Amino acid sequence: MSRLKVMIRNNQKKIKLPTGLRLLVRKCCQAVLTMENFDGSAEVSVSFVDNDEIRRLNKFYRNKDKSTDVLSFPLGENGVYDVNNETGAYLLGDVVISMETAVKQAKIYEHSLEREVGFLTVHSMLHLLGYDHETSPADAARMHEKEEIVLERLGITRDEKYSEIL
């Protein structure tokens, strides 16, 4: 199995991160790479932010002046990634998750915050690997299917909290 380094930063103070959330994020990242048969070591950065910060990033990088749930900043294209010269690991990119929006969406979809953050992490990891749900309905369906496969493999259903599975 390839090595994965996930650097996680909590850059917000509005939502207390539940116990085990960092482990959940790491497991989600690894599960995506395993499902995709990713060959080699990799590095990913995951940041938790508030709605103001994700709105600022969305406006700056995507010219969309609104908050969103997650942003993905891939460092590769067509399967070619930058490499950390010190470790030889592929630099996949950055994931930015709005904890405020994650809490709101967990309530709307009537599932746990852990499932929402797990979903957002898996979704964003697939973007880092080149998947794009906005290109066609078929691509959106394929990406959604992969998201659900990963979450199911991790035992993260809509009805369970991840902490109950640990």
Image (cartoon, grey):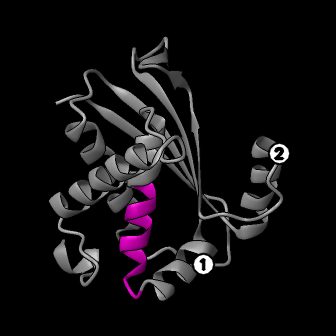
Q: Quadrant of the C terminus?
A: bottom left
| Mark toward the viewer: 2 or 1 | 2
Q: Which mark is residue 60?
A: 2
Mainly helix, strand or loop, the magenta region?
Answer: helix
Q: For the image shown, how many numbered marks are present on the structure?
A: 2
Q: Secondary structure at mark 2?
A: helix
Q: Are marks 2 and 1 in contact (CB under 8 Å)?
A: no
- What residue does disc 1 label? 15
Residue nearer the viewer, 62 or 100: 62
Question: Looking at numbered disc 1 in the image, what kind of residue is underneath it?
Answer: Ile
Q: Residue at x 23, y 28 (%)?
A: 2
Residue 12: image x %, image y %? 67, 67
Q: Residue at x 28, y 50 (%)?
A: 146
Residue 157, above or below 82: below
Q: Is residue 75 toward the left or the right of residue 41 in the image?
A: right
Question: Looking at numbered disc 2 in the image, what kind of residue is underneath it?
Answer: Phe
Residue nearer the viewer, 134 or 22: 134
Residue 89, above or below 144: above
- Highlighted magenta segment, given as a residue range: 110-121
Q: Quadrant of the N terminus?
A: top left
Q: Secondary structure at mark 1?
A: loop
Residue nearer the viewer, 106 or 8: 106
